[in-house]
Image: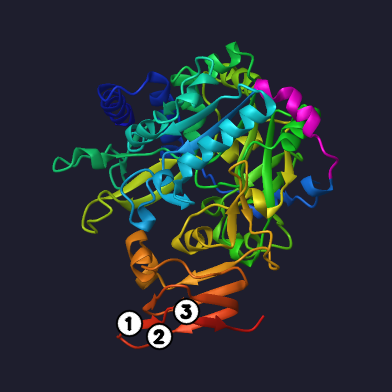
Amino acid sequence: MNAEIKSKITQLMIKDDLPQLCVDVFLSQYEKMLSGEESVIRESAIQPVTDVADLESLPDFSSKGEDFLNQSVMLKLNGGLGTGMGLEKAKSLLKAKDGMSFLEIIIKQAISQRKKFKSDMPLVFMNSFSTETDTREVLEKFPELKQGQNGIPLTFLQNKVPKILAESKEPAKWPKNPAKVWCPPGHGDIYTALQTSGILNQLLEQGIKYAFISNSDNLGASMDLSVLGYFAEQDASFMMEVADRTEADRKGGHLAKSAEGGLLLRESAQCHADDIDKFQDIDKYKYFNTNNLWIRLDRLKEQLEANNGILNLPLIQNRKTLDPRDPNSPSVIQMETAMGSAIANFKDSIAIRIPKARFAPIKTTNELLGLWSNAFVLDENSLIAVNPTRQAKYIIISLDDRYYKRIDDLQAHFPEGIPDLLECQKLTISGDVKFGANVTVIGNVIIRNDSDKQLLIESGAVLEGDN
């Protein structure tokens, strides 16, 4: 029976023009699921990482990094649609700062760095089938970006994989909307997509061997010469940028060591139920993965060639309904992998602790409101920075999901502009609250509206709370 199902999966994927390597990788993960192989990492099998190199305490490696800039590429994961915020297009097209989208800011960062260091460092986006067309339209507006690519494409496509019916383990069918039977395979697919697109070989042929990979919604993740220089100096194959776990990160994945002493990443989906308390112990497991990764492409290729093009990444099984909007649709398993888990595939992997400025992802409208405000600025190199006139470095914003979760709702509640948050440390809004023009928020402010009627903050109001 298994052979018959695998044949169905193969035919389905080949019919949809997916490359054979993508099929092979998916079937290897499918085998793990059928065999009941646990992707769980037990507490007894790992050790905490107690100390990593700290970027802020290291010497400046910028001059060394400049020497390697022409051997480097910046890869951006750009497959997300931002559906959690009510978006239907590429999340990177969302306006981020000074009227520019995330995508436009990333492009300007790369162009600025090329000019400053007289470098041809390529910038490449890994798109999904849903984001490719919209992204390409924006890239066409920047012909100067193509000039530094030296024939390297600006984009390549991640793959897609079939959803698997939870009960029968067969590939799902949904005649009324066939597109619903497909799902993204997680960002661990980058290692397959680099091969199937030909990009990996093209980069290596151009003498490019240092890749910096990050998410397009993290504008803090620019090419940093000192980090590049440090990575090159260590001669490591893989480096993960990590940050301190806080109470807000208790449920997120963390860095750990195997019994043999190698680095690994334990995600929440890999935590056994009996180990949850230890998993969430931020004093024991101090560091989380920012998804800012550095990889030696020549050594990646060696690993891939030694394993028929497949990196052994832990399987993540996400159980969902086939149609997310239809709770009565069949239960399915979406099989995914995480690119950060590749850290365990390289014995010489290292990690580096980074300041929060390099990890500023926009996942919700909470962070987006802060980014839109005057608490942050774009500097002359199009890098996002905390407004230098702020006394408190970072701002914490908590908005009521009932009224502010979607972009349209956020904009509707701030129709006359974002409040002045320059002196705001924390803003918490509960209930339906609409803001007038030129509102100023100072200190730690909590606004609560328990009524069914919308509360209006008058134009020109100054809201001041405890500091």
Q: Quadrant of residue 35?
A: top left
Q: In x, y percent, where is residue 427?
A: 54, 74
Q: CA distance from mark 1 to mark 2?
A: 8 Å
- Where, quadrant-wise, is the C terminus in this rendering? bottom right
Q: Residue at x 67, y 40 (%)?
A: 240
How many neighbours does mark 1 have within 10 angstroms: few (below 14), some (14-19), or many (20 or more)?
few
State the separation of the CA atoms marked 2 and 3: 20 Å
Q: Secondary structure at mark 1?
A: loop
First along the sequence among labels 2 and 3: 2
Task: Tell me if residue 69 is in the magenta stretch.
Answer: yes
Q: Main secondary structure of the magenta part?
A: helix
Return the disc, 1 or 3, that comes first in the chain's sequence.
1
Residue on which disc 2 sits: 449
Quadrant, the N terminus: top left
What residue would you read off at disc 3? 460
Helix, strand or loop status at disc 3 = loop
Which residue is most to the left?
176
- In the rendering, at what x and y percent does residue 172 appear? 25, 40
User: Are discs 1 and 2 less than 8 Å apart at CB?
Assistant: yes
What's the residue type where badge 3 is placed? Gly
Circle 3 Cα neighbour tier, 10 Å, few/some/many (<14 / 14–19 / ≥20): few
Q: Nearer the viewer, mark 1 or mark 3?
A: 3
- Amino acid carrying mark 1 in the image: Gln
The tag earlier along the polypeptide, 1 or 2, is 2
Name which residue lies at 53% across and 82% down: 463
Q: Going by the picture, which residue comes out furthest to the bottom? A: 451
Which residue was labeled with disc 1? 454
